Structure formats: C-alpha cells, structure tokens
Image (spheres, helix red, strand yellow):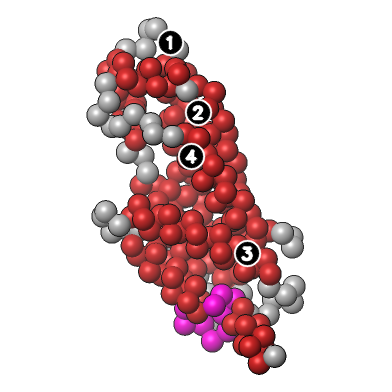
Amino acid sequence: MRIAPLAGLVAVVLTLVGFLLLGDTPGYDATGSEVRAFYADHEVRTGVSLYLLVLAAVFFVFFAAHLAHVVRDVPAGGGWLHRVVLGGGLLLALGFLTGSALTLALVDLADEPTASGPALQALNTLNEDFFIPFVAGLGVMLLGAGLATVRAAVSPLPRWLAWAAVVIGVLVFVPWAGFFAFMAGGLWIAVTSVLLFLRPQDGAPAETVTAGAARR
C-alpha cells in the first residue's frame, strides 16, 4: 500500500492527543479516594483518550510491519533484524493495549461503591508504573531499524536518521533518560514515516534520492 508508511505518523498523532486528553492522572502514591474521585470526574475524557490509544496501537503494528519490510530488503544489512523491528512494534502495541485495559478498569471501578480504596490504590499504582513494555518495544524497534541501516551500503533511510535510531534506541533503556528518549522516538517515527512515504515507488534509497537532488 502506497500510504502504509503514514501509519507511523497517524500513530504518533493519536498517541499525542490521547495522552494530552488523559491529562495528569493520580500518582502511584495517590489514595484510593483520590483515584476514585479523579476517574469518576473524568470518565468521558478518559474513555476518549483510551479509544485513541487503542487506535494508535493498531497503527503502530501497521507501521512496524512496513518498516520491517523495508529493513528486510536492505542489501547485506537487514539479515534477521527485520524480525526485531516487527517484534518491537508488537511489544509497543501490546504495552499500549494492556495499559489502556488497566486504565479502563479504573474507570469502571470508580463508579462501583463496592470497590475498596486499597484495591483502587493498588490498581492505580500498577497502571502508573506500567510503562516498561511500550517503552522497551519502541527501543527494540528503533535499534533493529538503526542497526540494519546504519552501515548498509544502500540504505532506505538517511545516514543521520539511522544513527538517530540507534542512539534513541539505547537511551530508551537508560534510567532517567528513557522518558525523553521515548518522546524523541515518537519524533523519529513521524519523520521516518513521512520520508518513507515520499520515497519513489521503485524503492530508490533515500540517500540516493538526496544525492541526486543535490546534484541538480
């Protein structure tokens, strides 16, 4: 599909809007009553944000599949790394879906008088700290794409973008840097999505196209 690369850009936009709508949720140390009050007061807004995040997970899978296909075709560079790219994308999507399910459980329990404060507090703590799967998935996907293209003789991505994938993929797993690396990873996906969409349909490498444009 010609528009397949744009799935990454759509996923990033949906994620950004979804998190903005979700807002400042109760911290991991919030009391049960604070958790109940927040999700009871923000039921509709939270529901819309969860719907957007679920859609984002779907588009991330489509983008990861397309990126894996691109990486697989890298001459003497892809090897088995296209499987790493797809696996990272699936882990990212699974993290989004599981996190959304945990938040939905909080929304449902907030309206239930029988739900105890300690139960809400425990579920909220789990939900607040449930970021490792999708952060790790992003890192794995970027590392796979970067390592496959950074040293390839003919690369579908500009060299700087391939190196950026490697650097961001490593920083995702560094404590206190992972949050900023996750945001940078979203920007990388958006830029890569657009560049892959703009590639000629014959699949000419990005660096070849850039060089040709410079000579003109």
Q: Residue furthest bottom?
A: 215
Q: Which is more N-terminal, label 3 or label 1?
A: 1
Q: Are marks 4 and 1 in contact (CB under 8 Å)?
A: no
How crowded pointer 3 is (Cα within 10 Å; few <14, some 14-19, many 20+) is rated as: some
- Mark 2–mark 4 Cα distance, whole angstroms, equals 10 Å
Q: Point out the tag, 3 or 4, that comes first from the N-terminus.
A: 4
Q: Earlier in the sequence, mark 3 or mark 2?
A: 2
Q: Amino acid at mark 3?
A: Val
Tell me whether circle 3 and circle 2 mark residues in contact (CB < 8 Å): no
Residue 91 x %, y %: 46, 50
Calculate the distance from the C-alpha at mark 2 to the C-alpha at mark 1: 17 Å
| Residue that carries the numbered disc 2 in the rendered image | 46
Secondary element type, mark 2: helix
Amino acid type, residue under disc 4 in the picture: Leu
Query: Residue 70: image x %, image y %?
Result: 61, 69
Q: Which residue is mark 1?
A: 112
Which span is picked out in magenta? 150-158
Q: CA distance from mark 3 to mark 4?
A: 23 Å
